[in-house]
Image (spheres, grey):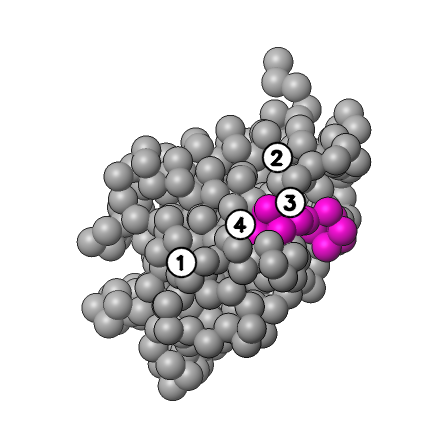
Amino acid sequence: MLDIYRYYSILLASGIVLETAASPKPGNVHRYRDYHDLLFEDFLLTGLVASHILYKGVLRGRRIHREYKVVYGDLIHDLVSYSMKLTGGSNTCLGTSLLIIPLAIATGYLLNNKEYIDPEKVARTSTFLLKNYSTVYDSIWFYRAVRKASPSYIRSSDKTEGYPNVYSKKYIRELISGNYSLWDIVEHSSKIDIVCKELVEGYPRSLYATKYLWSRLRKHGVWNKAVVETYLKLLSMYIDTTILRKHGIDVAGYVKKKALEIATYYGEQKVWDMIESFDKELHSRGINPGSIADIIAVAISLHAIHRRNNIIRYS
């Protein structure tokens, strides 16, 4: 029988797989659509890697009161790096790893051999622990993860307002000189990045999405449908900052407006034709709402923690 700490690491990792499997999620990789450098199967393998890395995080959370130089950064780096190594493809999980590794640390911190922990408390504790326990060495490892993933929306020409640019040749020296903890980096980045903002604010969008997902599953009992509806709901509420940074405010605003239009037709048969058409449009234009997808993955992880069993069924 799985020990409780390993079981919770699997619950957390399930979000990565189940988010990707839901289809069609307009603009993202899903079971019926790949990108040229990212396959649906890449995310399945990432979920396998995540289960192992998150288990290390859960166990580390049990011992967080001990003195650590690195609490978060190496785990974020390893999840990104080993996933890319195993699949041979591009980055699948940089944003998700930044959100889910702190959840794993908080889960281990709170579990203490309990059978149940409250997902809202896990979310709040993730933010609290990151603020109080992250170090400059976490930042160094996180920068390594970003450099490894090399997302197209982060550039060497970016203005960083005094913080080290991730592509600076002297980034390690600059981080140590400023003693910038991972919390410092994330808090600064939250001005322009919704994933960082989510972590700094205590996961409010993820928690909202968890409740919305459960309400849709209770309504009709179809897991895939509930995830797609939740994804579109968040896309209709927030500007996706991956789109914003790659394509500009007009495109990001259009995607948000279109998602809101589609969400008004929930319950009608034609909505799925609209979703499929929107998916084709975004893929043809190379528009990928990756930030909202990261938040949905974490929302599913929190849902799994809440349910513990029968996580994809209403029963």
Residue type at mark 3?
Answer: Leu
Which numbered disc flags the more N-terminal residue, 3 or 1?
Answer: 3
202 vs 192, left or right, is right
User: x%, y% of residue 64?
Assistant: 74, 36
Q: Main secondary structure of the magenta part?
A: helix
- Verify whether residue 132 appears in magenta: yes
Which numbered disc flags the more N-terminal residue, 2 or 3?
Answer: 2
Q: Pointer 3: what residue?
A: 103
- Verify whether residue 219 appears in magenta: no
User: x%, y% of residue 139?
Assistant: 57, 52
**Residue found 24% across the figure and 72% down from its top:** 285
Which numbered disc flags the more N-terminal residue, 2 or 4?
Answer: 2
Res 119 label: none
Asked if residue 15 shows in the view, the reply is no
CA–CA distance between discs 2 and 4? 18 Å
| Camera-nearest label, 1 or 2 | 1
Q: Pointer 2: what residue?
A: 57
CA–CA distance between discs 4 and 3? 20 Å
CA–CA distance between discs 1 and 2? 29 Å
CA–CA distance between discs 3 and 1? 31 Å
Which numbered disc flags the more N-terminal residue, 1 or 2?
Answer: 2
Q: Quadrant of the N terminus?
A: top right
Tell me which segment is drawn in magenta: 128-139
